[in-house]
Amino acid sequence: MRGIVLLHAIRSAIMALFFLVAMPAFAAEEIRFDKEPLLIQTAAGRVLHFTVEVALTSDQRAQGLMFRKSMADDAGMIFDFGEPRRVAMWMENTILPLDMLFADDTGTIRHIKENAKPYSRDIIDSMGDVKYVVELNAGIVAKLGIKLGDRIVSATTTKAK
């Protein structure tokens, strides 16, 4: 009888330990992103249409597109850094290769990083002060002819400052 009581006590202790360890994972709030249309107006007069998720908070910017296994060709993410500043990005825990557009507070593209390598810890520098970074699937920049000086336009880039 004592063996059965001891067995139940051990099982209860193990279950309690499991729930204590697992609780933070269950309690962690999933990071959600709003979506909005984003246009890229090219110097050649083309207008390219995308739907992007919006990363406004530090938690959203830290999460970004990490762990995503796929993304539609016309999808992406816009990071709003609030104030123009030099920005450093990296691809750790990012499965998808990406093209990155670095834009100033007017939405003008000032730097482009094509084909950022998945899982890389290499720093991707904005090469100057920017307010926005748009991440798209790798190859989109070359395929659509996006260039420096083109302009991104969305609710995020046109909101009251």
Image (cartoon, grey):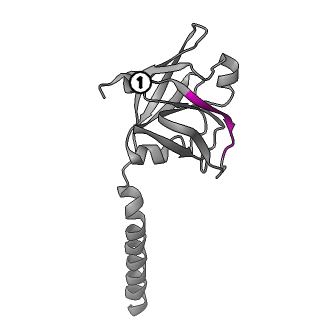
Q: Is residue 80 above or below residue 11?
A: above
Name of the residue lying farthest toward the top: 45
Residue that mark 1 sits on: 36
Q: Is residue 33 above or below residue 72?
A: below
Viewport quadrant of the N terminus: bottom left
Residue 28 relative to residue 102: left or right:
left
Q: Is residue 145 above or below residue 57?
A: above
Q: Considering the numbered disc 1 on the image, is that residue within a helix, a strand or a loop?
A: strand
Q: Is residue 134 above or below residue 88?
A: above
Residue type at numbered disc 1? Glu
Residue 111 is covered by the magenta coloring: yes
Residue 7 spot, x, y in % from top left: 43, 84
Q: How many marks?
A: 1
Residue 64 spot, x, y in % from top left: 50, 42
**Residue in view at x 66 percent, y 37 percent:** 97
**Residue in view at x 60 percent, y 31 percent:** 111
Residue 1 is covered by the magenta coloring: no
Q: State the extent of the magenta-drawn residues as a range.
A: 110-118
Badge 1, how many Cα within 10 Å: few under 14, some, many 20+?
A: some
Q: Main secondary structure of the magenta part?
A: strand
**Residue in view at x 47 percent, y 48 percent:** 62
Q: Nearer the viewer, residue 23 or 65?
A: 65
Name of the residue lying farthest toward the left: 160
Quadrant in the rendering for residue 60: top left
**Residue in view at x 37 percent, y 86 percent:** 5
Residue 12 spot, x, y in % from top left: 38, 77
Name of the residue lying farthest toward the front: 128
Viewport quadrant of the C terminus: top left
Residue 92 spot, x, y in % from top left: 61, 50
Quadrant in the rendering for residue 73: top right
